[in-house]
Amino acid sequence: MIEDELLKWKFKSGSKDALRRIYEKYRDYLLTLAMALVNDAGLAEDIVQDVFVTFAQAGDTFKLRGSLKSYLATCTLNRCRDQIRARKRQPVSLDDDVPMRSDFSTPDRRMISDEQSRQLADAMAQLPYEQREVIALHLNAAMKLRYIAGLQSVSISTVKGRYRYGLQKLRSALNGRL
Amino acid sequence: MKPADEIENVLRKMSFKAGSEMDKDLWAATSKAQSQSQKTKLALGQQNLWRTIMKSRTVRFTAAAVIIISCLTGLHFWKSTGSGIALAEVLTRIEQVSAYMYKMHWTETRQQTTSEVTSTVLVSQDNGIKMIQTRVDPNTGESRSDEIYLLPRENTLLIVLHKEKNIYRIKWEDAEEDYYKEKYNDPHTIIKEILNCSHISLGQSVIDGSTVEGFQTTDLTYKGGFFGRSDLIVGGLEKVDVKLWIDVETFLPIRFEEDIITKGRMHTHEVSYDFRWNVVVNADDFKPNLTEDYNSPEGNWNIPATNEENAIEGLRLFANYAGSYPDNLDSDSLKKEATKYLEESHISNEELTEDEKTTQNSELFTMLMSGVFYDDLVTENKDPVYYGKTVTPKDADKVLMRWKITDNEYRVIFGDLHAETVTPEKLAELEAALLK
């Protein structure tokens, strides 16, 4: 945390070194989160790039009292939500309850992952978005369920329910495959 | 069927990483965005928090590092309350105590996220302040223990992060002991503040078997505490409830409670308790136990004194890097320019050794000192003027910067960075020469 605070301070003073370190520290963390949420390598890359570009542009106007890691994760989450909504508005829409099957479900050569991670991302994509989001934020972004409840504007019990049902579905989907 | 916890463990290990091509593209876009943004903002002449900090004489340049460190460590001592004869006596009693310790529990809630810190604090008149604190990550629920040392004899703030085995050391050249204590709100300093505020008596009560007298303030102008966290109270306070309980037999504090809600809807709650007065300490208690594998990832931060000598040295350093003096001494743009030149002088921060990082930090702070010095002259109405846009290091006899000492004397720093005291008439001649 102290390292992040110093990086924030240096970043605000225009340090390219600080930006580089923040980028390197959280790049793969955000990519993994984005993949867990959208299961689309190209889209995940675009989302993470957008997060970092917006962050870099903020410069000295950037104000953050809390955790840099949570902030970047929340930015990624918001962009993923935007993309999900945009897809729903497309003529061939993807309803929340319809499993998301992306043409890009296998990460392209620009992204490195193991077979298990790809299978997990595919299985996550079968979940309703809200359940997928809770699981990704809790297990991939290490957020507490109570915090996620705030992000989803629902009660903690609803979040716990989404988490529990989501895991159940994943257990079924992954049964014997991992 | 897999047990849920196994599924959870497998999901936690899910990992996607950028390949070299993706990494290259992502960083190129990120880096470009920063560069373009900086150019735009420089042109717009935007100001920021740094400027605000630098404009303040009391919360000036050196405070910046303290603000960072204190914000992230949750370093929190005491806050102010009301006033009263009893409190004056309390102040006297505390001054007579050579060393004491107490515990503190502090929570901060913002946007449904609560941070929690529990600390044990040891205060010694001779040795300084030592704090062992346990912090709970609001997101992961993980706890960690760190140590913070405030060592007035060495003018040093030392932070030890045991989990990472990292050390952060900030050393001031000219800070007074009171400055530290004020920043870190030791009980003695806070009770001084209490004496300057209105309060009410809560009468007597009993805490842990001791008869106590209570004092309370709900004054919204309350500004104690926040120890350099004043940036947190933007917009002021919405609610203040501070209570101090004094043992009627010893006239020493026995409990302190503070509950504050800011207009930004941040809620802090703090309780200091379990005071032990006149404890025996020795110097070794204030020496952290560090093994050889502890590192200082940012190097040391040695912050020079604010004076003419260091201002000149800062200008000299800047000119060495840039080939010219800063166009102006605005703290914001000066900091950005200095950072830029320093970072251009090496390929990557990662390649620097700790000593090299320390040297780089010192050079940065020294370069900034010219701006801090100038800001102080402005604050003190000393009529400073700076001619960095037109005067270069080659202009040995031209006025680079000047300010008033008395009605009959001005101090002048020339283009070659030598300094002289001149009369107003002589200064007028020198400045007239600049127009030719």
Image: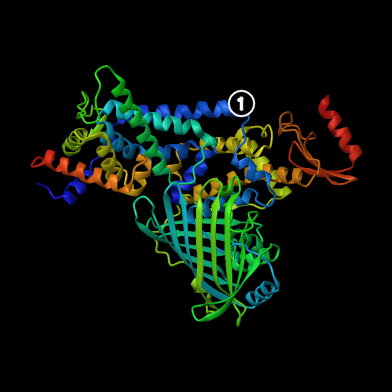
Q: Residue at x 21, y 33 (%)?
A: A125
Image spot of residue B300 (x, y percent): 52, 53
Indicate how the structure is coloured in the image.
rainbow
- The residue sitting at the bottom extreme is B249
SS of the residue under disc 1? helix
Q: Chain of mark 1?
A: B
What percent of the width, then of the height, locates residue A146?
34, 49
Q: Horizontally, is B277 left or right of B389 in the view?
A: left
Q: Amino acid at mark 1?
A: Ala
Residue B383 spot, x, y in % from top left = 81, 41
Give the vertical position of B367 relative to B77 (above or below): above
Residue labelled with disc 1: B43
Q: Quadrant of residue B377?
A: top right
Q: For this rendering, which residue is in front, A30 or B309?
A: A30
Residue B87: name its quadrant.
bottom right
**Location of residue B398 with respect to B134 vertically, above or below:** above
Please give the count of numbered marks on the rendered protein: 1
Residue sitting nearer the eye, B91 or B81: B81
Report whether residue B226 is seen.
no
Figure quadrant of the C terminus of chain B: top right
Is residue A157 positioned above or below B335 on the image? below
Q: Quadrant of residue A24?
A: top left
Q: Position of residue A37 (x, y in %)?
A: 28, 34
